[in-house]
Amino acid sequence: MPERLQLTLDYTFKKTFTEKHEILIDLINSVLEFPSSSKIECIEIRNPEILPEDIHKKYIILDIIAYDNLDRQYNIEMQAAKFDAYPDRAAYYLSGLFGSQLVRGEDYSLISPALGLHFLNYIQYPDYPDDFHFNFSLRDGKYHDIVLSENLSLHLLELPKVTEKTYARNNKTEWLYFLRNAHKEKEENMQKKYANPRIHEAFHLLNDLSANDEARLQARARERAIFNKRIELGYARQKGLEEGIEKGIEKGTLNTQIAIAKKLKHLGISDKQIAQTTSLDASTIQALEV
């Protein structure tokens, strides 16, 4: 069998989990630990196709929306790599999901809650190594018990923090551990390692996708596109840093020259001599206060 694709790649995630909605429903209900009174009931795929031009973008917009039996809607995302603008992008798309429900003149009380469930294939918050699940909502910055609205929140799940030790301590992380490790699991170990039958279904779908020549080529193209974007951003960041350092050196040099000029002026050295020593222009030296 060809090398298995990674489920943490946004392309592979969408291709696998939109094939059979029951599997994605089980994934969401499991990781959010929903009681039966508020379980996800249906999935809507708003753009089922991944266009060739989408492969080369920083993000693939999955447009996977889930609905629970309380009429709440969930935006499901897989973030394959870390980009600086991701938090703003996440807030933008979630607020769009929330705000696009009404037409002009409709009552705001008709808006259904909008929640985000985003799987991150990287660590966004390294200062909290023992926690992988973060839930952001609209709360007061001083009084955290005051919530402006319960209708908008974002769940972030950092997959790299779900290690073998994490899974051994907490079997509720079964799906998360599988998402991170599905590409390297051995078929003969699956029954022993995972109790959830839906995970086995996802594993077989992933195998089928990995055996598809076209899908494998697109997945590899997607991986290259993400890698190139990160290289481009890294280069731009490095260039900006170097320019900033140069400006800082120039500013530091100027400040040093002014300090020397003030001392020389205080000693009664002529402006002409100070100019020759510091390279400052005559007008700058004349304006110095000592």
Image (tube, helix red, strand yellow):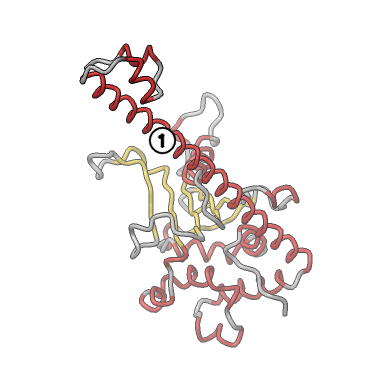
Q: Left or right: where does residue 50 sit relative to residue 268?
A: right
Quadrant of the rendering where the C terminus is positioned: top left
The type of residue carrying mark 1 is Gly
Which image quarter is the N terminus in?
Answer: bottom right
Circle 1 sits on which residue?
248
| Observer-nearest of 217 and 177 | 217
Name which quarter of the figure residue 137 lies in: top left
Where is residue 229 shown, x and y percent of the image?
62, 50
- State whether residue 14 is above or below residue 142: below
Q: Is residue 79 above or below residue 173?
A: above
Mark 1 neighbour class, 10 Å CA radius: few under 14, some 14 to 19, many 20 or more: few
Against 19, residue 269 (above or below) is above
Give the x, y percent position of residue 166. 39, 73
> Which residue sits at x=43%, y=49%?
154
- Res 81 → quadrant: bottom right
Residue 267 point in image, percent of width and height = 21, 20
The percent position of residue 142, horizontal first and vertical second, equals: 23, 39
Dot 1: element: helix
